[in-house]
Image (cartoon, coloured by chain):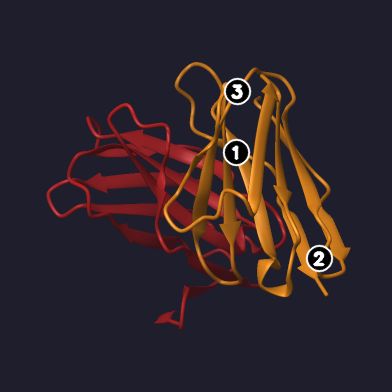
Amino acid sequence: GESVGLHLPTLSVQEGDNSIINCAYSNSASDYFIWYKQESGKGPQFIIDIRSNMDKRQGQRVTVLLNKTVKHLSLQIAATQPGDSAVYFCAERTGGSYIPTFGRGTSLIVHP
Amino acid sequence: GAVVSQHPSWVICKSGTSVKIECRSLDFQATTMFWYRQFPKQSLMLMATSNEGSKATYEQGVEKDKFLINHASLTLSTLTVTSAHPEDSSFYICSADPPGNQPQHFGDGTRLSIL
């Protein structure tokens, strides 16, 4: 299930299940969105991105969905594995800005 | 793929010490690099944008005299935490934008602990 902690929401799933991590963004002018995975003690790693002219993009075991109407982004991980346990951040960029704005992050815990 | 290397990965030092953290883009040139700070269980907070050959741009509330940034070459930016105190203990992460409109790539962070 999903719970909201003091700072970081947590999603617990069983190995093999599909995971869905959600992100709401606030800037309707944002046109580029990125999902990052951060393992404990490491920097964020790029997973997948999507531009605002698309509503879905698929990678290996991951799918990003973008709903611009409600300013919502989701990351779907198929057949979740223990190695997927990490904190996942969405980030948005606007126009010509280099600088992404990061969401609060979601901690994914995968139980064997 | 684009690689960003950060060094050291872990520093423990006494209060009052100045600590330098290096961020290198290993296989691409980066005119702009970014420095973030991250507290436990929180998101990344942008501290400053490092610009090659010019002054860094600091975010509101970040002391430029406390966090000195130097970007002397297209592959290296350094962050120096001057006269560090326990409240400066944190996880510091750098990033850079590879060419070709790719997303930012991040270093593996530096865990700074001030005793």
Say whether residue B12 is left or right of residue A91: right
Observer-side mark, 2 or 1, equals: 2
Label 2 environment density (alpha carbons within 10 Å; few <14, some 14–19, many ≥20):
some
At 17% from the left and 45% from the top, the residue drawn is A28
Circle 2: residue type: Gly
Q: Quadrant of the N terminus of chain A?
A: bottom left
Q: Quadrant of the C terminus of chain A?
A: bottom right
Chain for mark 3? B
Chain for mark 1? B
At 40% from the left and 58% from the top, the residue drawn is A103
Chain for mark 2? B
Q: Which residue is tagged 1?
A: B95
| Label 2 SS | loop
Q: Is residue A23 above or below residue A101?
A: below
Q: Which residue is tagged 3?
A: B52
Q: Which chain is red?
A: A
Q: Which chain is orange?
A: B
Observer-side mark, 3 or 2, equals: 2
Circle 1: residue type: Ser
Q: Which residue is tagged 2?
A: B16
Residue A31 vs residue B36, the one in the foreground: B36
Observer-side mark, 3 or 1, equals: 3
At 46% from the left and 76% from the top, the residue drawn is A7
